[in-house]
Amino acid sequence: MSFNSPAFSFRRVGAMVLRHWYLLRSSWPRLLELTYWPAVQMFMWGFLQLGVAQQTGTFVAATSTFLAGFFLWDLLFRGQLGYSMSFLEEMWSRNLPNLMISPLRPAEFVLSLMIMSVIRLSVGFIPVTILAIWFFGFNLWSLGLALVFFFANLFFTGWAVGMFCSGLVLRNGMGAEGLTWSLMFIMLPLACVYYPVTTLPLWLQPLAWLLPPTAVFEGMRALVLNHIFRADLMLWALGLNVLWVAIGAASFVILLRGARKVGSLISVGE
């Protein structure tokens, strides 16, 4: 990827997106994997929700946050994973050195991976939300326009983590591949996916509020339980995401330059 190539080109971005789209649609195991795990987890949380309702003798409104929390967490995790998987496809096929000597710019490469993360997520996410309506009567889409803010903030966070993980793999080789699957789970306890921030110890709560997803999940609970859209939380998450994306992009460029300097790109894919 040349830093001295001509101006930003959406044609090059489109070409990269088409490359990964053709790869995805030509492989039914890849397509199945996009739906399989979200569906399994959706059924688990859906039946847990029904079990809680049966034990209490009535449907408790709070139990609906199980499925809502699952869907938003899955969007966050798979948004990051969709970005990283497209990047790793280039590593596994040993195609990255070819891209490095092409006119493709780093920003174009990153944007194409972002677009592919949305496409990959949509393939698996939308069918599972329909299954949730059918089996459990839970309609995520009934949350309305608030989903635009939820989805946008979660995608931004996922992309920021994806850029950082991709940079680590470039700099340290495939030994760092495991981080692309596991790094996001560091957030799971602190992002308060299934419980409010007040559940955490007081000394941990300020740290939780530094994670953009925390504001999104708190906003989700306010909407589901109290039918209140917390614009202040969405603005807080957006402000944090501006910082997170900037750090993610900067780390990717710095790690890419470091990989070039030490020559780790020569053995990429090994």
Image (cartoon, helix red, strand yellow):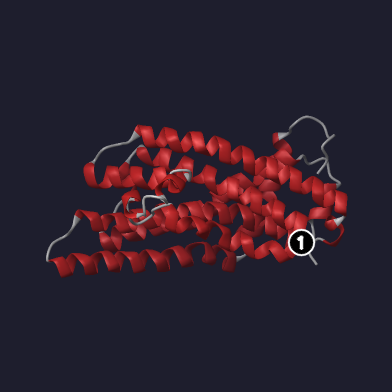
In this rendering, position of residue 4 left or right of residue 88? right
Toward which corner of the image does residue 173 lie, by quadrant? bottom right
Q: Nearer the viewer, residue 204 or 17?
A: 204
| Whether residue 244 can be seen here | yes
Q: Nearer the viewer, residue 267 or 31?
A: 267
Q: Quadrant of the N terminus?
A: top right
Q: Residue furthest top?
A: 7
Measured as percent of width and height from the top left, residue 122 is found at 49, 51
In the rendered image, the vertical position of residue 242 relative to residue 73, given as above or below: above
Measured as percent of width and height from the top left, residue 125 is found at 45, 55
Q: Nearer the viewer, residue 3 or 233?
A: 233
Q: Which residue is mark 1?
A: 173
Badge 1 marks a residue whose secondary structure is helix
Q: Residue furthest left?
A: 57
| Residue at 65%, 50% in the rendered image | 164
The number of discs equals 1
Within 10 angstroms of label 1, few (less than 14), some, or many (20 or more) residues? some
Toward which corner of the image does residue 151 lie, by quadrant? top left
Q: Quadrant of the C terminus?
A: bottom right
| Residue at 29%, 60% in the rendered image | 134
In this rendering, position of residue 175 left or right of residue 60? right
Q: Amino acid at mark 1?
A: Gly
| Whether residue 125 can be seen here | no
